[in-house]
Amino acid sequence: MNKIEHVGIAVNSLSKSVPLYEILLDTSCYKTETVASEYVNTAFFKTGESKVELLEATDDDSAIAKFLEKKGEGIHHIAFAVDDILKEMERLKASGFVLLNDVPKKGADNKMVCFVHPKNTNGVLIELCQEIKWI
């Protein structure tokens, strides 16, 4: 794992939270995106070498909606950038970690992603991210 790629924060409303984080981080939201497969709208901010991703549910049965119902707004996950997501997934599986998906899937911000089950990481949802490179 190379670095923390971003911190994901679950929010009830992007329309309310984006202006708040623009003031808080003293930077503009550089990208919003819908990830239909995850039933989520996202908004990204860059501060220094780090990013913050806000996540808003688009469906009451989505993982973000369930998180918000159970825990309220707050940190949802920490994402780490990796060079080879398949190799990192194999390394983690061999070490006994449970992955939430068997193959990487398309995530937001031009990334392939995989999540590590929080029961293996002291309750923290970990996301692996690899930049999708266009040849």
Image (cartoon, grey):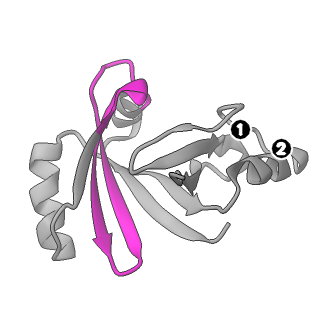
Give whichever of discs 1 and 2 has the lower sequence position. 2
In the image, taking residue 14 as reference, residue 34 lies left or right, namely: right
Q: Is residue 132 magenta?
A: no
Query: Residue 113 location, x and y as percent?
Result: 56, 45
Query: Residue 114 location, x and y as percent?
Result: 61, 42
Residue kind at label 1, given as amino acid type: Leu
Residue at 10% x, 45% y: name it.
15
Q: Quadrant of the N terminus?
A: bottom right
Q: Is residue 100 above or below residue 47?
A: above
Which mark identifies residue 108?
Answer: none
Magenta segment range?
Answer: 34-63
Q: Is residue 89 above or below residue 79?
A: above
Residue kind at label 2, given as amino acid type: Lys
Label 1 Cα crowd, 10 Å radius (few <14 / some 14-19 / many 20+):
some
In this rendering, the count of numbered labels is 2
Give whichever of 44, 64 is nearer the camera. 44
Give whichever of 2, 23 is nearer the camera. 2
Residue tagged 2: 93
Q: Is residue 107 above or below residue 81?
A: above
Secondary structure under badge 1? loop
Residue at 27% x, 64% y: name it.
45
Q: Are marks 1 and 2 in contact (CB under 8 Å)?
A: yes
Secondary structure under badge 2? helix
Q: Quadrant of residue 64?
A: top left
Label 2 Cα crowd, 10 Å radius (few <14 / some 14-19 / many 20+):
some
Which mark identifies residue 99?
Answer: 1
